[in-house]
Image (tube, rainbow, N blue to C red):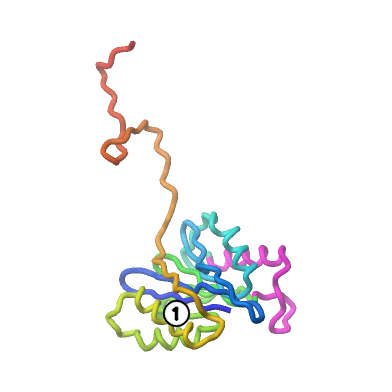
Amino acid sequence: MTIIVAIKDVSGVYVGSDSIISSDDEIIEFGSKVVFAPNFAIAFSGSVKGGQLLFEHLSKCKKKINNVLDCMELARFIRKIYAKEGIQQSLSGVNFPEMDACLILCTVDSIYLILEDYSVLDVTKSGHTAQGAGGPYAAGALDGLRFSDLPPRAKLEIAIQSSIERHPNCGGNPHIYKVEYNERPKRNSTKKQKDNGETKPVKRSSNTKKS
C-alpha cells in the first residue's frame, strides 16, 4: 500500500511517492518508490517484490518512450517479468493474470498509467494523477491546487502529505523528482585532457618533434 503521484506543468514532469511499505500489521521504511531508467521513470505501488523487480530490470533499460505504443511494449515486458517470478494474480476473474496495483510511467513531457491488466492510458492532458491506497486523498489535494501558483514540487509534497495524514498505510517522507533524460554521453575517439575542471580536446602541433 502506498501513494504515488505525478504532475506536469510548463517546467516539466515531476513524480513522487511516500516511503513506507506495509505488510499485515507491520510498517517498514522502504524509501523512494520511483525507478529511473535512462529515458523514463516509473513509480510503483503494490507488492514489494514487484517494486524490487522493477528496480532490477528497468534501471538499465535503454528503451525510449515516445507514445502509448512504446508504453504498451514496456507493459508487455513487465508482464513477462512478473509472470516469470510468479507474482501475478487474477483480480477480476478473467483468464489472464494481473498486477496487484497500477504503475505511473513518466517521460520528460508525458504521464501514462499502466493499469492492473497491463493496459495503458495517456493521462498527460489531465495534468496530474495519484494512485495507490492514498490516491483519492492526493488526487483531491492536486485538484484543489490546480490553479495555485505553487511550484510543482510543492504541490506534490502537499498531495503526498495529505495521503500520509489520512491513510494508515501511507507514511514516511515524500520523495519527489523531476523527470529528465539521463542518456550516457557518446564516446569521442579524440584524446582529451582536463583543464580547470573542464574536459577539452588535445590540440596536436604539426611541429611536434619525435623524441
The residue shown at (35%, 76%) is 154
- Looking at the picture, does residue 55 appear above or below residue 136? above
Answer whether residue 19 is visible to the viewer in this image: yes
Q: Position of residue 7 (x, y in %)?
A: 40, 75
Circle 1 — which element?
helix
Q: In the image, what residue occupies the spot 46% across and 78% down? A: 123
Is residue 197 toward the left or the right of residue 175 in the image? left
Residue 144 pos. (x, y %):
37, 88
Magenta part of the protein: which range? 71-99
In the rendered image, residue 94 lying in the magenta stretch gets the answer yes
Between residue 118 and residue 211, name the one nearer to us.
211
- Quadrant location of the N terminus in the rendered image: bottom right
Q: Quadrant of the C terminus?
A: top left
x and y percentages locating residue 70 in the rendered image: 53, 64
In the picture, residue 120 is in which quadrant? bottom right
Residue corresponding to mark 1: 160
Is 153 situated above or below 211?
below
Outermost residue to the top = 211
Disc 1 marks a residue whose amino acid type is Ile
Question: Label 1 neighbourhood size at 10 Å, few (<14), some (14-19), many (20+)?
Answer: many
Q: Is residue 169 above or below residue 81?
A: below
Q: In the rendered image, is residue 114 in sight?
A: no
